[in-house]
Image (cartoon, coloured by chain):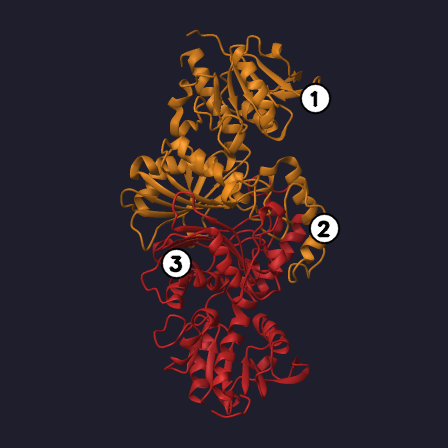
Chain colours: A orange, B red
Amino acid sequence: MSDRLPTLAVVGATGAVGTVMLDILSTRENVWGEIRLVASPRSAGRRLTVRGEEVEVQALAPEVFDGVDVAMFDVPDEVSKEWAPIAAAHGAVAVDNSGAFRMDPDVPLVVPEVNAEKTRDRPRGIISNPNCTTLSMIVALGALHREYGLSELVVASYQAASGAGQEGIDTLRDQIEKAAGDRTLGERAGDVRAAVGELGPFPAPLAMNVVPWAGSLKDGGWSSEELKVRNESRKILGLPDLRVSATCVRVPVITTHALAVHATFEREVDASAARELLAAAPGVVVQDDPANAEFPTPADVVGTDPTWVGRIRRSIDDPRSLDLFLCGDNLRKGAALNTAQIAEVVAREFTGS
Amino acid sequence: MSDRLPTLAVVGATGAVGTVMLDILSTRENVWGEIRLVASPRSAGRRLTVRGEEVEVQALAPEVFDGVDVAMFDVPDEVSKEWAPIAAAHGAVAVDNSGAFRMDPDVPLVVPEVNAEKTRDRPRGIISNPNCTTLSMIVALGALHREYGLSELVVASYQAASGAGQEGIDTLRDQIEKAAGDRTLGERAGDVRAAVGELGPFPAPLAMNVVPWAGSLKDGGWSSEELKVRNESRKILGLPDLRVSATCVRVPVITTHALAVHATFEREVDASAARELLAAAPGVVVQDDPANAEFPTPADVVGTDPTWVGRIRRSIDDPRSLDLFLCGDNLRKGAALNTAQIAEVVAREFTGS
C-alpha cells in the first residue's frame, strides 16, 4: 500500500455512458492521480474536459494501459471481451460495464452498497458492473434482503429509450415530433405506426406506445434483458436459488428506468418498518406519500444518483410480500456511477484510505 | 318468452364510452327493437346516429324507462347509484358500467366469456360491468383458470390516458405537443414537468414519463384501481381467496391498457399448451412470435375487440407459473363492448334465441 494516487483509464470516453462518466469524475471526491481518456482510433485526438482540465483522447492500444491502476470500460461487449484482459495483463484492474464477463464465475459482479467486499475476489483482474435494469432496483432490494431474507422476485419494467443508446434517444425524439401534430393519433390500430416513421433500435413504435421487448430472444421465449435481471440479481445477492420472473417493457421515456417489484421474503414484512429501513439505506431515497402525489417518476428522478422507492405496500394476501415502485437513472447509477463507485473501492487499495 | 325484439336505453349516450357504444351497436348483429338515447338535460335534443338512423337524445327522467327492457348506464358512479335502481323499478334490467354496484353481493359482475350464467342471478335487477383494467386481462385468465386452476396473480399495468376520460386524452395530447419541440427534454430532473404545463387529471406529467398512480388512496397505501383489480378478479372468477397484488401505472398512450401478468396455478403449466388454449378461447387473440417482432402493443391493438396475449412464458423457477403480456382496448372490451355483450345475453331472454 502506498500513498500514491492511482492512475485511471476511461475506455469509451466519447460514448453516451462515457460522457456521463466524465461528468461524474468531475463532481465526485477526487481519488485519482492521472486520468487517461481512451476511445476508438477515429475519436483519438479529440480533447474532452474532466475535472476542469482538457485531456486528449488516446486511441485504444495495449500501451495505453502502461502504468494504469484501474481501467474502466464503457464499450460494447466484443470490445470489452478483447481489451479488458489486455488491460489486466498490463497490471490494471479492469472495471467493465459490458455484458461480457458478468456471469463469469471468476469475475465478481459488484454493487458497492450491496457486496463491495467482492471486489477483492478477482482472479482474472476484472470486475463487472451489472446491467442497468438490475441496478435500478438491486440497492433497495439488497437492503430489504439483509433484513427479511429474499425468496422471490416478480418484476415488470418500464425501461427508457436511452437503454438502447443514443440511437434509442434520437429515435424516440424523432417519433414524438412526428406524432405530436396529429390530435387523432392513437385511436385506431396502426395509425401511430404509420405516423412515426423509422423504428430505430426498437421492434415497434415507441412514441405513444409501450413495447414488451428489450434485448435478444433466448430459450423459452425470454428476452436477454429478462434473463439478466434474473441471473444478475441472483449473483449480486449471493442467492443462487432465488426465484425471479421479469417482464421487460420499453416505454416512451428518454432516460431513467422504473420497475414494479413484487418481492417475497422468508419472514413477515411490515410496510412502515420497510420504509424506515430503506430511508436509512445508503444510495436509496424513499418518496412515498401518495396522498400528496409523492412517488418517484422517471421525469423527476433523471439525472440523480440514488435509487428512488415509493408505493411501498405489504401485499394484502401475503404477509411476506412487499409491492414497490422504483426509479433509477439508467445512465448514472445504472451505468457510469456504479462503475465509478467500484473503481473508487479499488482505488482505496492503493491509497489505504 | 316472446318473439318481440327488446327495447334498449343507452344512458350516457353522449360521453366518451357512450360514443363508442353507439358505434358498437351500429356494427354488431342487431338484437334490439327500439333504441332510446338518454343523457343529462343539457344534452337533450341533440341528434345522434345509431344503426344508421338519427335518434334524438332524451333527458334522464323516470319516464324514459317506461317500456324499456334493458338500460345500459355509461355514467359516473353517483348517477348510476341513483338511476340504475329507478330503471330497475320500471322493469328494465340495468347493465351498469360504473363502480357503484360492482362489489354488491346482490349484483353479478359479468364478463360473458367467463361467467355469462351469472346474468340471471340479479335480485336487484342490476348487472355490473367490471373496471377496464380488470377487463383487459380477465378473459384470457378465465380461460387459463378453467384448465389449470388459478391461485395467485401479480399484475403491473401500463394504463392509457383515456382511462381518465376525455380530459385524460386531451391532457396527454397537449403535453406531447408542448414536449415535442425541445430535443433536450427528459435528461434533467424536473424539466419535463416545467415544459408540459397542466397536469389535468394526472398527479404528475404523463408525456415522456410514467406515473405510478390511478384512482384514489385506500388503506395500506393501495390505490382504488389496484384494489379493483384484486376484488373484481376474485368476484368474476368466483375465487374469493385468490391472492392478488397489482401495481397500476399510467403510461403516455392514448387508448388501450396493457398488463404484465405473473399467474400462478394449482397445476403445472406448459407454455405451448397455454398458447393453444388461449388461441382457441373466445375473445382472445394470441400474438406471440418475438423472433419476428410479434407481440401485442397498445398502438397496434387500439380499436379492436379482443384481448391480445403475447410473451407467453413458463417461469424458469416455478413450473406452476406463467408470465404474460396482454393488451385490451379500455374503451371497447374494457367498457362499451362488454356492456353490450352483457345486454345481448339478457336480450336473449326476450327473444328466446
Task: Left or right? Give the position of A59 relative to B268.
Answer: right
Q: Residue at 49% across / 11% down in the picture?
A: A5
Q: Nearer the viewer, residue B166 or A63?
A: A63
Q: Residue at 42% across / 88% down in the picture?
A: B89
Query: Circle 3 marks a residue in which chain?
Result: B
Q: Are marks 3 and 1 on the same chain?
A: no
Examine the rendered structure and indicate whether residue B241 appears above or below residue A344. below
Q: Earlier in the sequence, mark 1 or mark 2?
A: 1
Q: Is mark 3 on a helix, strand or loop?
A: helix
User: Which label was assigned to residue B120?
Assistant: none
Return the residue at label 3. B148
Report if residue B137 is visible in the image: yes
Examine the rendered structure and indicate whether residue A275 appears above or below residue B258. above
Q: Residue at 62% across / 18% down in the picture?
A: A37
Task: Left or right? Give the position of A327 relative to A190.
Answer: left
Q: What residue type is labelled 1?
A: Ser
Report if residue A51 is visible in the image: no
Examine the rendered structure and indicate whether residue B136 appears above or below residue A338. below
Q: Nearer the viewer, mark 3 or mark 2?
A: 3
Q: Quadrant of the C terminus of chain A?
A: top left
Neighbour tally class for label 2: few under 14, some 14-19, many 20 plus, Cα within 10 Å: some
Q: Nearer the viewer, residue B76 or B189?
A: B76
Neighbour tally class for label 1: few under 14, some 14-19, many 20 plus, Cα within 10 Å: some
Return the residue at label 2. A178
User: Which label was assigned to residue A43?
Assistant: 1
